[in-house]
């Protein structure tokens, strides 16, 4: 289990589930300050070649355009690596942002 806590960034917790699945739990705010840390974490996870990367948004209070761009980049990198990229349990704010930006059709989203 890896937890990254920065008072100016989102908190990330990674846990392995199953043989080839990784769950990355986000909490707090995903903005320009935490976006680069998340991008690095996603790259590190994908380097290990999981079958699926699930990004759990249940505890994420806020996402700005930099955070959203990081999720899109993560999705594209996962697709290029042959890893399924899933967003899980988006909060109301996250769901609205995905709807407004038409990204709801890009991501696989589970509740």
Image (cartoon, grey):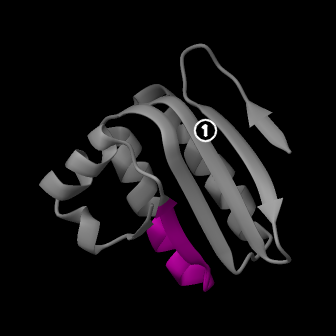
Mark 1 nearby-residue class (10 Å; few <14, some 14–19, many ≥20): some
Span colored in magenta: 75-87
Q: Identify the image quadrant of residue 4.
A: top right
Identify residue for label 1: 37
Q: For the point 30% across and 42% down, which residue is it?
A: 92
Q: For the point 63% across and 67% down, which residue is it?
A: 53
Q: For the point 80% across and 70% down, which residue is it?
A: 48
x and y percent of residue 76 in the render? 45, 72
Report whether 63 appears left or right of 102.
right
Query: 75 and 20: which one is in front?
Result: 20
In the rendered image, is residue 109 in sight?
yes
Q: State the quadrant of the C terminus.
A: bottom left
Q: Residue furthest front?
A: 111
Q: State the quadrant of the N terminus.
A: top right
Q: Residue furthest bottom?
A: 82
Q: Residue furthest top?
A: 7
Helix or strand or loop: what does disc 1 sit on?
A: helix
Residue 82 on the magenta segment: yes
Q: Considering only vertical position in the picture, is 54 above or below 98?
A: below
x and y percent of residue 29 in the render? 45, 27
Query: 109 and 69: which one is in front?
Result: 109
Report whether 98 appears left or right of 12.
left
Q: For the point 82% across and 73% down, which residue is it?
A: 18
Query: 43 and 106: which one is in front?
Result: 106
Report whether 3 appears left or right of 40.
right
In the rendered image, is residue 74 in sight?
no
x and y percent of residue 7 in the render? 60, 13
Q: Considering only vertical position in the picture, is 100 above or below 3?
A: below
């Amino acid at each position: 289990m890896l937890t990254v806590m920065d008072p100016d960034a989102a908190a990330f917790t990674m846990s392995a589930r199953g043989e080839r699945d990784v769950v990355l739990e986000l909490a707090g705010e995903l903005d320009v300050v935490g976006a680069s840390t998340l991008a690095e974490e996603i790259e590190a996870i994908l380097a290990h070649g999981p079958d699926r990367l699930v990004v759990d948004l249940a505890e994420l209070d806020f996402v700005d355009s930099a955070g959203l761009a990081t999720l899109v980049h993560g999705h594209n990198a996962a697709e290029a690596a042959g890893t399924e990229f899933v967003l899980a349990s988006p909060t109301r704010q996250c769901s609205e942002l995905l709807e407004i930006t038409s990204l709801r059709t890009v991501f696989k989203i589970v509740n």
